[in-house]
Amino acid sequence: MQDRAQVGRRKRISNRTVFTGSCWMLFALVASAAELVPPLASTMLAIAGFVLVMYGVHVGWLVVYEREPDGPSS
């Protein structure tokens, strides 16, 4: 069972990484459309943003998954 402080910390980490990853993908999209950076650089930035979003979703899922069990194991 997780304590409230640990759950809060994981939620903040999850929110922060999803927001950061989304911003990176948005910046990669804008930079690619305005041709500010080479295509490879914007692709790598978008991939890094996607990885951050997936990590944030994973951490958020652990908050839900590792909660107190509903009953005895079968």
Image (cartoon, grey):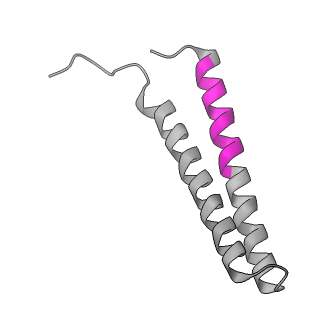
For this view, does 29 lie left or right of residue 5?
Answer: right
Q: Is residue 57 magenta?
A: no
Residue shown at 67% from the left, 46% from the top: 17
Residue shown at 50% from the left, 43% from the top: 58
For this view, does 22 lie left or right of residue 65?
Answer: right
Residue shown at 48% from the left, 39% from the top: 61
> Where, quadrant-wise, is the N terminus in this rendering?
top left
Q: Which residues are magenta?
A: 6-18
Q: Is residue 53 above or below residue 26?
A: above
For this view, does 4 lie left or right of residue 19?
Answer: left
> Where, quadrant-wise, is the C terminus in this rendering?
top left
Question: In x, y percent, where is residue 10?
Answer: 61, 30
Q: Is residue 6 above or below residue 39?
A: above
Q: Nearer the viewer, residue 71 or 66?
A: 66
Question: In x, y percent, where is residue 63?
Answer: 51, 31
Q: Nearer the viewer, residue 55 or 69?
A: 55
